[in-house]
Image (cartoon, helix red, strand yellow):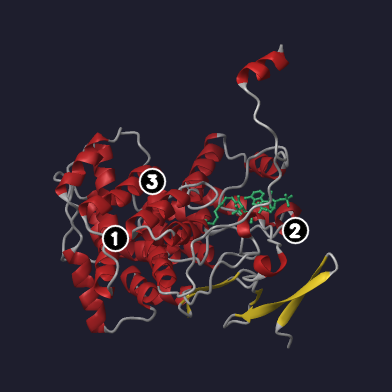
Amino acid sequence: MTEHAKLVYNGNSIDLPLVEGSEGEMAIDITKLRSETGLVTLDYGFANTGSCLSEITFMDGEKGILRYRGIPVEQLAEHSTFKETSYLLINGCLPSQEELTEFSVLLNDHSLVHEDMQIFYANYPRQSHPMGILSSMVNALRSFYPALQITEEEINMTVTRLLSKIRTMAAMSYKFSRGHKVVYPRPDLSYCANFLNMMFDTPVKPYEIDEDVVQALNVFWILHADHEQNCSTSAVRIVGSGRVNLYAAISAGIAALWGPLHGGANQAVIEMLMDIHASGGDLKTMVKRAKDPNDPFRLMGFGHRVYKTYDPRAKIMKAMCDKILKKLKIVDPLLDLAKRLEEIALSDAYFVDRNLYPNIDFYSGIVLRAIGIPTNMFTVMFAIGRLPGWIAQWKESIDDPRWKLSRPRQIYTGPKQTDYVPIKKRDARKN
Ligand code: CMC
């Protein structure tokens, strides 16, 4: 097999080394391209650019494969918990019983949020989007808790604080938005049950923990836990590359996730389905609009940069919709609409030719609605799920001796050098 790719340009050529991943993926290493040729590459949206070597998550977009540390996501969704999967992603292997217990104790020990932080929550306008609040509050953690991150112990402390407090902070923002009293974390509850209890327990109506709902949340968060170099993870790595503290890098990841083309799609899908429902179920118009190149509207929850087949997470999520709605005896008209929309799109040449299938966000909102999560918190739920992935990717980058400041190049297309003209002369020219 050749070990180089040859680039021929303007009568010159250069051999560029090939790099092979453990699943046979090949890349051209262009590290020396500019220093040896003066050339840079141009790749909008980094669609063909690998930014790092990574041992965390493997995706095959053509075959619909997703594995964390080698383990298929289907197996994790069936057998693992979100806490165990978080440990796997961050530490590289599944924990022993002793390690898992130790991890749980640490998470419990750090689940409280400094009381002074409540002042911020109390003063956000009630209509604030919870993603904006979460991003700024995670950044604010740096002011309340040290972000020492030199020794392994210090890093573990910051990581544990983030993993544990993010649930408390997300639930707090919900309670404040409702004008309700904050519910504190309980050490006797599991990670997911604790979150649900902090969200929904009230002095008037104690929250009854339903193991099927807890399981649904575990699966939801496991499916979101990592997705290699997506937009928000790249934001965490890029911002982190400036050597900021971990809280700031995660806060940037949350901000990136908020967008409707990324994590914000789960909220956008439900809003789209609600619009269709309100308009009497007119699916054909939506599909027509999505196909119109002159209409910016897109079918939310459809398409993916990497998956060119059915998103494996969407398959699990779709089955979860049926299961949880049946268990909770909920009839959600949006599920029926979503299934019909999928059917129409998947038999339409536009979507077939472009390999546009439902992604994780297409069905996830229906699960979240069923367990009582308000629509504007859907992306916060995604963020909590993605946190272990962001942390694992950040940890991997700080441990990598090749870790460099992220600083892409550009191709300048503006004016050539031009002289400064004083304002009087500029005005005179105009008149
Ligand atoms: N509805 C209609 N057309 C679409 C859609 C869609 N949802 N997605 C892609 N296309 C078309 C697009 O117009 C283009 O058509 P043409 O070749 O005629 O110009 C073609 O498919 C390729 O699209 P692209 O924008 O070049 O592909 P991309 O890889 O840059 O976009 C995407 C990926 C996820 C941004 C896009 O599919 C999209 O906007 N989907 C809707 C938003 C969404 O569901 N996002 C969640 C993604 S999964 C969660 C996560 O990991 O973030």
Q: Of the two numbered discs 3 and 2 on the same chain, state the one appearing first in sequence.
A: 3
Q: Is residue 293 left or right of residue 59?
A: right
Q: Of the two numbered discs 1 and 3 on the same chain, state the one appearing first in sequence.
A: 3
Q: Give residue 358's position: percent from left, percent from top.
A: 58, 57
Q: Give residue 8's position: percent from left, percent from top.
A: 81, 70
Tell me whether circle 1 and circle 3 mark residues in contact (CB < 8 Å): no
Q: Nearer the viewer, residue 180 or 287?
A: 180
Q: Name the residue rendered at 25%, 57% in the picture.
A: 165
Indicate the amino acid at tag 1.
Answer: Leu
Indicate the amino acid at tag 3.
Answer: Met
Question: What residue sits right under mark 1 in the picture?
Answer: 162
| CA distance separating discs 1 and 2 | 42 Å
Q: Of the two numbered discs 1 and 2 on the same chain, state the one appearing first in sequence.
A: 1
SS of the residue at dot 3? helix
Q: Name the residue rendered at 69%, 57% in the picture.
A: 42
Indicate the amino acid at tag 2.
Answer: Asp
Q: Quadrant of residue 38?
A: bottom right
Instruction: Judge depth for marks 1 and 3 and give the one in front.
Output: 1
| CA distance separating discs 3 and 2 | 35 Å
Quadrant (top left, top right, bottom left, bottom right) of the N terminus: bottom right
Quadrant (top left, top right, bottom left, bottom right) of the C terminus: top right
Question: What residue sits right under mark 3 in the picture?
Answer: 131
Q: Quadrant of residue 297?
A: top right
Question: What residue sits right under mark 2 in the picture?
Answer: 353
